[in-house]
Image: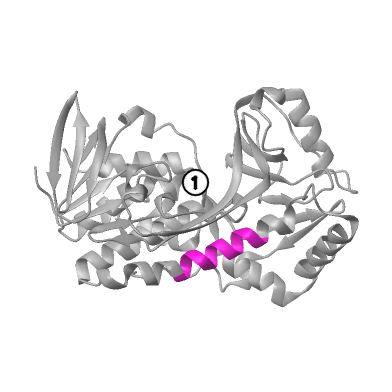
Protein backbone atom coordinates (compact mmCIF):
# COMPACT_ATOMS: atom_id res chain seq x y z
CA UNK A 1 0.00 0.00 0.00
CA UNK A 2 1.14 3.55 -0.66
CA UNK A 3 0.10 7.00 0.57
CA UNK A 4 1.61 10.47 0.69
CA UNK A 5 1.71 10.75 4.51
CA UNK A 6 1.75 7.83 6.94
CA UNK A 7 0.44 8.98 10.32
CA UNK A 8 1.22 6.79 13.33
CA UNK A 9 -1.31 7.18 16.15
CA UNK A 10 -5.03 8.03 16.24
CA UNK A 11 -4.93 10.40 19.18
CA UNK A 12 -6.02 14.01 18.69
CA UNK A 13 -2.68 14.95 17.05
CA UNK A 14 -2.75 12.23 14.42
CA UNK A 15 -6.47 12.59 13.72
CA UNK A 16 -6.28 16.36 13.42
CA UNK A 17 -3.27 16.15 11.10
CA UNK A 18 -5.23 13.72 8.92
CA UNK A 19 -8.16 16.15 8.81
CA UNK A 20 -5.95 19.14 7.94
CA UNK A 21 -4.22 17.21 5.14
CA UNK A 22 -7.51 15.93 3.76
CA UNK A 23 -8.79 19.50 3.43
CA UNK A 24 -5.61 20.33 1.48
CA UNK A 25 -6.11 17.39 -0.87
CA UNK A 26 -3.14 15.45 0.55
CA UNK A 27 -3.59 11.69 0.90
CA UNK A 28 -2.81 10.16 4.32
CA UNK A 29 -3.39 6.93 6.23
CA UNK A 30 -3.61 6.77 10.03
CA UNK A 31 -2.29 3.59 11.68
CA UNK A 32 -3.53 2.92 15.23
CA UNK A 33 -2.68 -0.16 17.29
CA UNK A 34 -5.81 0.06 19.48
CA UNK A 35 -9.40 -0.47 18.43
CA UNK A 36 -11.83 2.38 17.86
CA UNK A 37 -13.69 1.84 21.14
CA UNK A 38 -10.47 2.22 23.15
CA UNK A 39 -9.51 5.45 21.35
CA UNK A 40 -12.93 6.95 21.97
CA UNK A 41 -13.02 6.27 25.70
CA UNK A 42 -9.49 7.02 27.02
CA UNK A 43 -9.62 10.05 29.29
CA UNK A 44 -7.15 12.88 28.80
CA UNK A 45 -6.96 16.67 29.14
CA UNK A 46 -9.91 18.91 28.47
CA UNK A 47 -8.82 22.57 28.43
CA UNK A 48 -8.58 24.12 24.96
CA UNK A 49 -6.71 27.32 24.18
CA UNK A 50 -8.34 29.96 22.01
CA UNK A 51 -6.16 28.92 19.03
CA UNK A 52 -7.19 25.27 19.35
CA UNK A 53 -10.88 26.19 19.33
CA UNK A 54 -10.38 28.51 16.34
CA UNK A 55 -8.56 25.78 14.40
CA UNK A 56 -11.20 23.12 15.08
CA UNK A 57 -13.84 25.55 13.84
CA UNK A 58 -11.82 26.39 10.73
CA UNK A 59 -11.48 22.72 9.76
CA UNK A 60 -15.16 21.91 10.32
CA UNK A 61 -14.68 19.87 13.49
CA UNK A 62 -16.34 22.08 16.10
CA UNK A 63 -20.10 21.58 15.73
CA UNK A 64 -20.45 19.65 18.99
CA UNK A 65 -17.70 21.67 20.65
CA UNK A 66 -19.69 24.86 20.05
CA UNK A 67 -22.82 23.26 21.50
CA UNK A 68 -21.32 21.54 24.54
CA UNK A 69 -18.03 23.30 25.31
CA UNK A 70 -17.83 25.52 28.40
CA UNK A 71 -16.10 28.83 27.68
CA UNK A 72 -14.14 30.43 30.53
CA UNK A 73 -13.05 34.06 30.61
CA UNK A 74 -11.05 33.78 33.83
CA UNK A 75 -9.57 31.46 36.43
CA UNK A 76 -8.97 31.62 40.16
CA UNK A 77 -5.70 31.34 42.06
CA UNK A 78 -6.47 30.35 45.65
CA UNK A 79 -3.99 30.42 48.52
CA UNK A 80 -3.98 31.47 52.15
CA UNK A 81 -7.71 30.79 52.32
CA UNK A 82 -8.49 33.48 49.73
CA UNK A 83 -9.36 33.43 46.02
CA UNK A 84 -7.92 35.78 43.41
CA UNK A 85 -9.46 35.96 39.91
CA UNK A 86 -7.22 36.28 36.86
CA UNK A 87 -9.37 37.93 34.18
CA UNK A 88 -8.05 36.04 31.15
CA UNK A 89 -10.19 37.74 28.49
CA UNK A 90 -9.70 41.26 29.84
CA UNK A 91 -5.95 40.80 29.94
CA UNK A 92 -5.58 39.21 26.47
CA UNK A 93 -7.82 41.25 24.21
CA UNK A 94 -10.84 38.96 24.45
CA UNK A 95 -9.25 35.51 24.28
CA UNK A 96 -10.74 32.70 26.35
CA UNK A 97 -10.31 29.00 27.09
CA UNK A 98 -12.89 26.25 26.58
CA UNK A 99 -13.53 23.08 28.55
CA UNK A 100 -14.18 20.19 26.16
CA UNK A 101 -12.76 16.74 26.80
CA UNK A 102 -10.04 15.35 24.53
CA UNK A 103 -12.12 12.17 24.33
CA UNK A 104 -14.86 14.14 22.60
CA UNK A 105 -12.43 15.71 20.12
CA UNK A 106 -11.26 12.22 19.17
CA UNK A 107 -14.85 11.09 18.63
CA UNK A 108 -15.58 14.12 16.47
CA UNK A 109 -12.50 13.68 14.28
CA UNK A 110 -13.03 9.93 13.82
CA UNK A 111 -16.62 10.58 12.73
CA UNK A 112 -15.38 13.05 10.09
CA UNK A 113 -12.69 10.79 8.63
CA UNK A 114 -13.33 9.26 5.18
CA UNK A 115 -13.80 5.50 4.96
CA UNK A 116 -10.49 3.65 5.15
CA UNK A 117 -8.41 6.64 6.20
CA UNK A 118 -7.94 5.25 9.73
CA UNK A 119 -6.79 1.65 10.23
CA UNK A 120 -7.56 0.54 13.78
CA UNK A 121 -5.83 -2.55 15.14
CA UNK A 122 -2.77 -1.80 12.99
CA UNK A 123 0.29 -2.13 15.21
CA UNK A 124 3.40 -0.43 13.80
CA UNK A 125 6.44 -2.66 14.33
CA UNK A 126 9.09 -0.83 12.30
CA UNK A 127 9.66 2.69 11.02
CA UNK A 128 12.12 3.35 8.19
CA UNK A 129 12.63 7.14 8.06
CA UNK A 130 14.92 6.97 5.01
CA UNK A 131 12.90 5.01 2.43
CA UNK A 132 10.41 6.06 3.99
CA UNK A 133 8.25 3.06 4.92
CA UNK A 134 6.17 1.79 7.83
CA UNK A 135 5.72 -1.89 8.63
CA UNK A 136 2.65 -2.82 10.67
CA UNK A 137 0.81 -5.91 11.88
CA UNK A 138 -2.91 -6.19 11.19
CA UNK A 139 -5.06 -9.30 11.74
CA UNK A 140 -1.92 -11.30 12.45
CA UNK A 141 -0.22 -10.40 9.14
CA UNK A 142 2.61 -7.98 8.36
CA UNK A 143 1.99 -5.19 5.86
CA UNK A 144 4.09 -2.32 4.50
CA UNK A 145 2.99 1.23 3.85
CA UNK A 146 5.23 3.22 1.51
CA UNK A 147 4.92 6.99 1.72
CA UNK A 148 6.59 10.34 1.09
CA UNK A 149 6.94 11.12 4.80
CA UNK A 150 5.95 9.78 8.22
CA UNK A 151 4.26 11.71 11.03
CA UNK A 152 4.98 10.20 14.45
CA UNK A 153 1.95 11.05 16.61
CA UNK A 154 2.02 7.93 18.78
CA UNK A 155 3.10 9.41 22.11
CA UNK A 156 6.05 8.95 24.41
CA UNK A 157 5.81 5.14 24.45
CA UNK A 158 5.30 4.76 20.68
CA UNK A 159 7.79 3.52 18.11
CA UNK A 160 8.28 6.87 16.36
CA UNK A 161 10.33 8.57 19.07
CA UNK A 162 12.82 5.70 19.25
CA UNK A 163 13.30 5.83 15.48
CA UNK A 164 14.84 9.32 15.65
CA UNK A 165 18.62 8.92 15.53
CA UNK A 166 21.14 11.25 17.15
CA UNK A 167 18.59 13.05 19.31
CA UNK A 168 19.27 14.96 22.50
CA UNK A 169 16.85 14.43 25.40
CA UNK A 170 16.06 17.02 28.08
CA UNK A 171 13.89 15.94 31.00
CA UNK A 172 12.95 16.63 34.59
CA UNK A 173 11.06 14.51 37.12
CA UNK A 174 9.02 16.24 39.83
CA UNK A 175 8.74 15.01 43.44
CA UNK A 176 4.95 14.82 43.30
CA UNK A 177 2.11 13.41 41.21
CA UNK A 178 -1.57 14.16 40.57
CA UNK A 179 -4.46 12.05 41.79
CA UNK A 180 -7.19 12.86 39.27
CA UNK A 181 -10.84 12.00 39.87
CA UNK A 182 -13.96 12.23 37.72
CA UNK A 183 -17.02 12.71 39.91
CA UNK A 184 -20.72 12.63 39.08
CA UNK A 185 -21.45 15.87 40.91
CA UNK A 186 -22.21 19.39 39.58
CA UNK A 187 -19.11 21.62 39.74
CA UNK A 188 -18.72 23.85 42.78
CA UNK A 189 -17.25 26.60 40.62
CA UNK A 190 -17.95 28.32 37.31
CA UNK A 191 -14.24 28.80 36.53
CA UNK A 192 -11.19 26.66 37.24
CA UNK A 193 -9.62 26.97 40.68
CA UNK A 194 -5.86 26.48 41.03
CA UNK A 195 -5.15 26.11 44.73
CA UNK A 196 -1.86 26.27 46.64
CA UNK A 197 -1.96 24.81 50.16
CA UNK A 198 0.69 23.75 52.64
CA UNK A 199 -0.61 20.17 52.31
CA UNK A 200 -0.27 20.29 48.52
CA UNK A 201 -1.77 21.58 45.30
CA UNK A 202 -5.42 21.07 44.31
CA UNK A 203 -7.33 21.86 41.12
CA UNK A 204 -11.07 22.10 40.61
CA UNK A 205 -11.98 21.70 36.95
CA UNK A 206 -15.15 20.50 35.26
CA UNK A 207 -16.31 18.39 32.34
CA UNK A 208 -19.97 19.41 32.10
CA UNK A 209 -22.69 21.03 34.24
CA UNK A 210 -23.15 17.58 35.84
CA UNK A 211 -19.56 16.24 36.03
CA UNK A 212 -16.59 17.59 38.00
CA UNK A 213 -12.90 16.91 37.38
CA UNK A 214 -10.67 17.37 40.44
CA UNK A 215 -6.99 16.83 41.20
CA UNK A 216 -4.87 16.47 44.32
CA UNK A 217 -1.09 16.64 44.66
CA UNK A 218 0.04 13.28 46.06
CA UNK A 219 3.25 11.33 46.49
CA UNK A 220 4.47 9.71 43.24
CA UNK A 221 4.41 6.29 44.93
CA UNK A 222 0.71 6.57 45.85
CA UNK A 223 -1.81 4.26 44.21
CA UNK A 224 -5.51 5.02 43.59
CA UNK A 225 -6.33 2.32 46.15
CA UNK A 226 -4.55 4.41 48.80
CA UNK A 227 -7.23 7.06 48.35
CA UNK A 228 -10.77 5.88 49.19
CA UNK A 229 -13.51 8.33 48.23
CA UNK A 230 -13.99 9.64 51.78
CA UNK A 231 -10.31 10.50 52.07
CA UNK A 232 -10.31 12.30 48.71
CA UNK A 233 -13.27 14.53 49.58
CA UNK A 234 -11.88 15.30 53.04
CA UNK A 235 -8.53 16.36 51.58
CA UNK A 236 -10.15 18.43 48.85
CA UNK A 237 -12.28 20.25 51.43
CA UNK A 238 -9.19 21.00 53.53
CA UNK A 239 -7.14 22.38 50.65
CA UNK A 240 -9.96 24.40 49.06
CA UNK A 241 -11.21 25.87 52.36
CA UNK A 242 -11.62 29.66 52.42
CA UNK A 243 -12.25 32.22 55.13
CA UNK A 244 -15.63 33.09 53.58
CA UNK A 245 -16.99 29.55 53.94
CA UNK A 246 -16.90 28.41 50.29
CA UNK A 247 -18.52 24.97 49.96
CA UNK A 248 -17.28 21.99 47.94
CA UNK A 249 -20.00 19.69 46.64
CA UNK A 250 -19.21 15.98 46.77
CA UNK A 251 -20.71 12.88 45.18
CA UNK A 252 -19.94 9.51 43.55
CA UNK A 253 -16.42 9.22 42.07
CA UNK A 254 -16.53 7.45 38.73
CA UNK A 255 -12.79 7.25 37.96
CA UNK A 256 -9.49 7.86 39.74
CA UNK A 257 -5.88 7.65 38.54
CA UNK A 258 -2.41 8.80 39.62
CA UNK A 259 -0.33 10.69 37.03
CA UNK A 260 3.42 11.34 37.53
CA UNK A 261 4.69 14.86 36.80
CA UNK A 262 7.50 15.29 34.32
CA UNK A 263 8.94 17.58 31.65
CA UNK A 264 10.50 16.10 28.51
CA UNK A 265 11.79 17.38 25.16
CA UNK A 266 13.63 15.56 22.42
CA UNK A 267 15.62 17.51 19.83
CA UNK A 268 15.35 17.57 16.89
CA UNK A 269 11.72 16.75 16.12
CA UNK A 270 12.75 15.26 12.79
CA UNK A 271 14.96 12.48 11.43
CA UNK A 272 15.18 12.15 7.63
CA UNK A 273 11.51 11.81 6.50
CA UNK A 274 10.11 11.17 9.98
CA UNK A 275 8.51 14.12 11.82
CA UNK A 276 7.44 13.98 15.47
CA UNK A 277 4.41 15.74 16.94
CA UNK A 278 2.76 15.84 20.35
CA UNK A 279 3.90 13.60 23.20
CA UNK A 280 6.29 11.75 20.90
CA UNK A 281 8.42 14.90 20.98
CA UNK A 282 7.61 16.61 24.27
CA UNK A 283 5.74 16.24 27.54
CA UNK A 284 4.75 19.01 29.94
CA UNK A 285 3.41 18.74 33.49
CA UNK A 286 -0.37 19.26 33.26
CA UNK A 287 -0.52 22.34 35.50
CA UNK A 288 -0.37 24.77 32.56
CA UNK A 289 -2.83 22.76 30.42
CA UNK A 290 -0.43 22.81 27.46
CA UNK A 291 -0.10 19.16 26.40
CA UNK A 292 -3.06 18.81 24.03
CA UNK A 293 -2.77 22.40 22.80
CA UNK A 294 0.93 22.02 22.03
CA UNK A 295 0.19 18.86 20.01
CA UNK A 296 -2.46 20.76 18.04
CA UNK A 297 0.07 23.50 17.36
CA UNK A 298 2.59 20.89 16.14
CA UNK A 299 0.28 19.30 13.58
CA UNK A 300 -1.02 22.68 12.44
CA UNK A 301 2.55 23.69 11.61
CA UNK A 302 3.35 20.27 10.11
CA UNK A 303 0.31 20.31 7.82
CA UNK A 304 1.25 23.78 6.61
CA UNK A 305 4.86 22.74 6.05
CA UNK A 306 3.80 19.66 4.05
CA UNK A 307 1.48 21.71 1.88
CA UNK A 308 3.91 24.60 1.36
CA UNK A 309 7.19 22.70 1.10
CA UNK A 310 8.61 24.18 4.31
CA UNK A 311 9.53 20.96 6.07
CA UNK A 312 13.19 21.90 6.60
CA UNK A 313 12.19 24.55 9.13
CA UNK A 314 9.63 22.45 11.01
CA UNK A 315 11.76 21.25 13.93
CA UNK A 316 13.51 24.54 14.62
CA UNK A 317 10.33 26.63 14.52
CA UNK A 318 8.35 24.18 16.67
CA UNK A 319 11.03 23.92 19.33
CA UNK A 320 10.84 27.68 19.97
CA UNK A 321 7.19 27.34 20.97
CA UNK A 322 7.76 24.00 22.72
CA UNK A 323 10.31 25.54 25.07
CA UNK A 324 8.01 28.51 25.78
CA UNK A 325 5.27 26.05 26.78
CA UNK A 326 7.74 23.97 28.78
CA UNK A 327 8.84 27.03 30.73
CA UNK A 328 5.29 28.17 31.46
CA UNK A 329 4.26 24.68 32.58
CA UNK A 330 7.34 24.43 34.81
CA UNK A 331 6.62 27.89 36.24
CA UNK A 332 2.97 27.10 37.02
CA UNK A 333 3.93 23.75 38.53
CA UNK A 334 6.64 25.07 40.85
CA UNK A 335 4.56 28.15 41.75
CA UNK A 336 1.56 26.15 42.96
CA UNK A 337 2.84 22.80 44.26
CA UNK A 338 4.30 22.15 47.68
CA UNK A 339 7.83 20.80 47.33
CA UNK A 340 8.40 18.20 50.06
CA UNK A 341 12.13 19.04 50.06
CA UNK A 342 11.69 22.82 50.44
CA UNK A 343 12.64 24.60 53.65
CA UNK A 344 10.69 27.38 55.38
CA UNK A 345 12.57 30.09 53.48
CA UNK A 346 11.67 28.60 50.08
CA UNK A 347 8.01 28.30 51.08
CA UNK A 348 7.82 31.95 52.13
CA UNK A 349 9.37 32.94 48.80
CA UNK A 350 6.68 30.91 47.04
CA UNK A 351 3.90 32.75 48.88
CA UNK A 352 5.55 36.08 48.09
CA UNK A 353 5.61 35.15 44.40
CA UNK A 354 1.92 34.18 44.47
CA UNK A 355 1.04 37.52 46.06
CA UNK A 356 2.98 39.32 43.34
CA UNK A 357 1.21 37.43 40.53
CA UNK A 358 -2.27 38.37 41.80
CA UNK A 359 -1.41 41.98 42.74
CA UNK A 360 0.63 43.01 39.69
CA UNK A 361 -1.14 43.76 36.41
CA UNK A 362 2.03 42.88 34.50
CA UNK A 363 2.43 39.51 36.25
CA UNK A 364 -1.27 38.65 35.84
CA UNK A 365 -1.07 39.53 32.14
CA UNK A 366 1.96 37.28 31.67
CA UNK A 367 0.06 34.37 33.21
CA UNK A 368 -3.05 35.10 31.15
CA UNK A 369 -1.18 35.45 27.82
CA UNK A 370 0.59 32.14 28.30
CA UNK A 371 -2.53 30.37 29.56
CA UNK A 372 -4.83 31.29 26.65
CA UNK A 373 -2.00 30.57 24.19
CA UNK A 374 -0.16 32.45 21.48
CA UNK A 375 -0.78 32.28 17.72
CA UNK A 376 0.23 28.94 16.21
CA UNK A 377 3.10 28.63 13.76
CA UNK A 378 1.96 27.60 10.31
CA UNK A 379 -1.63 28.78 10.63
* Badge 1: residue crowd in 10 Å (few <14, some 14–19, many ≥20): many
From what the image shows, is residue 339 above or below residue 377?
Answer: above
**Chief secondary structure of the magenta span?**
helix
Relative image position of residue 244 (x, y in whole percent): 89, 48
Lateral position of residue 366 relative to residue 125, left or right: right
Q: What colour scheme does the image use?
A: one colour
Relative image position of residue 135 (x, y in whole percent): 19, 40
Q: Nearer the viewer, residue 222 or 26?
A: 222
State which quadrant residue 216 falls in.
top right
Tag 1 secondary structure? loop
Q: Residues in magenta?
A: 320-331
The number of numbered discs placed on residues in the rendered structure image is: 1
**Residue at the outermost left position:** 1
Q: Residue at x 16, y 38 (%)?
A: 116
Q: Nearer the viewer, residue 232 or 316?
A: 316
Lateral position of residue 58 relative to residue 375, left or right: left
Relative image position of residue 236 (x, y in whole percent): 77, 37
Q: Nearer the viewer, residue 373 or 13?
A: 13
State which quadrant residue 186 falls in.
top right
Q: Residue at x 9, y 47 (%)?
A: 2
According to the picture, the residue beneath numbered tag 1 turns out to be 100
From what the image shows, is residue 227 above or below residue 155?
Answer: above
Residue 74 visible to an observer of this rendering: no
Lateral position of residue 58 relative to residue 48, left or right: left
From what the image shows, is residue 336 above or below residue 224?
Answer: below
Residue 121 visible to an observer of this rendering: yes
Amino acid sequence: MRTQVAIIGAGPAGLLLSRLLERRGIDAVVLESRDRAYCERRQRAGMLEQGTVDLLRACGAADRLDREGLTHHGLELRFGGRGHRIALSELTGGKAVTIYAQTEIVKDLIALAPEGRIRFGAEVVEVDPVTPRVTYRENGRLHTLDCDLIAGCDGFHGVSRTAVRGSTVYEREYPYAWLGVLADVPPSTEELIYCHHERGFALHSLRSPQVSRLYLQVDPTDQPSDWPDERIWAELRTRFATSDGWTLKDGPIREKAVTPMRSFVTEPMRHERLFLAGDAAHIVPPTGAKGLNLAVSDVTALAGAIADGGLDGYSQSRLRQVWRAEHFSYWMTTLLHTDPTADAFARRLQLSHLEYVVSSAAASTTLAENYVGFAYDGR
